[in-house]
Image (cartoon, rainbow, N blue to C red):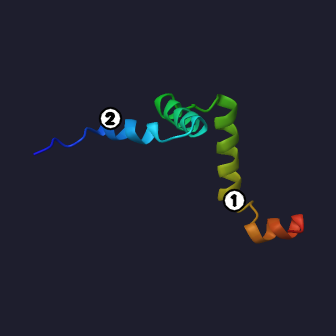
Amino acid sequence: MAAEPSTKDAIRRIIDGMSNEEAERLLDYLNMLADPHELSEDERARVEAAEERMGRGEYSTLRELQGELGV
């Protein structure tokens, strides 16, 4: 009975079939998972302010935005 391929072996086979461009995108994704970007204080404050505005009903629906943009 043949041994099941390991997860790493399966990943290697997939990578071997990729173009360099695809492999670069995969590497970018894996690097992001390994070191996720944390929000700066300014980014965090902007998100909180936006959430507060949304909580007060200060937002536009997609249809309203499309109408404003003429899309």
Is 34 situated above or below 46? above
Residue situated in front as seen by the camera: 44 or 57: 44
Q: Residue at x 68, y 57 (%)?
A: 54
Q: Residues within 10 Å of mark 2 (few under 14, many from 20)?
A: few
Q: Which mark is residue 56?
A: 1
Going from the N terminus, do you reach mark 2 or mark 1 first? 2
Q: Nearer the viewer, mark 2 or mark 1?
A: 2
The quadrant of the image that shows the C terminus is bottom right
On the image, the x and y values in percent for residue 19 come to 56, 39
On the image, the x and y values in percent for residue 55 come to 65, 58
Q: Amino acid at mark 2?
A: Lys
Is 15 situated above or below 64? above
Identify the secondary structure beneath mark 2. helix
Residue found at the far left of this picture: 1
Q: Amino acid at mark 1?
A: Arg
Q: Residue at x 80, y 69 (%)?
A: 64
Q: Residue at x 76, y 64 (%)?
A: 60
Residue situated in front as seen by the camera: 18 or 65: 18
Q: Is residue 67 left or right of residue 50?
A: right
Q: Residues within 10 Å of mark 1 (few under 14, many from 20)?
A: few
Q: Is residue 12 left or right of residue 68?
A: left
Identify the secondary structure beneath mark 1. loop
Q: How many marks?
A: 2
Residue situated in front as seen by the camera: 39 or 26: 26
Q: Is residue 41 left or right of residue 11?
A: right
Q: CA distance from mark 2 to mark 1?
A: 49 Å
Dividing the picture into quadrants, the one containing residue 13 is top left
Please name the residue that numbered disc 2 is placed on: 8
Residue situated in front as seen by the camera: 58 or 17: 17
Q: Is residue 51 left or right of residue 3?
A: right
Dividing the picture into quadrants, the one containing residue 11 is top left
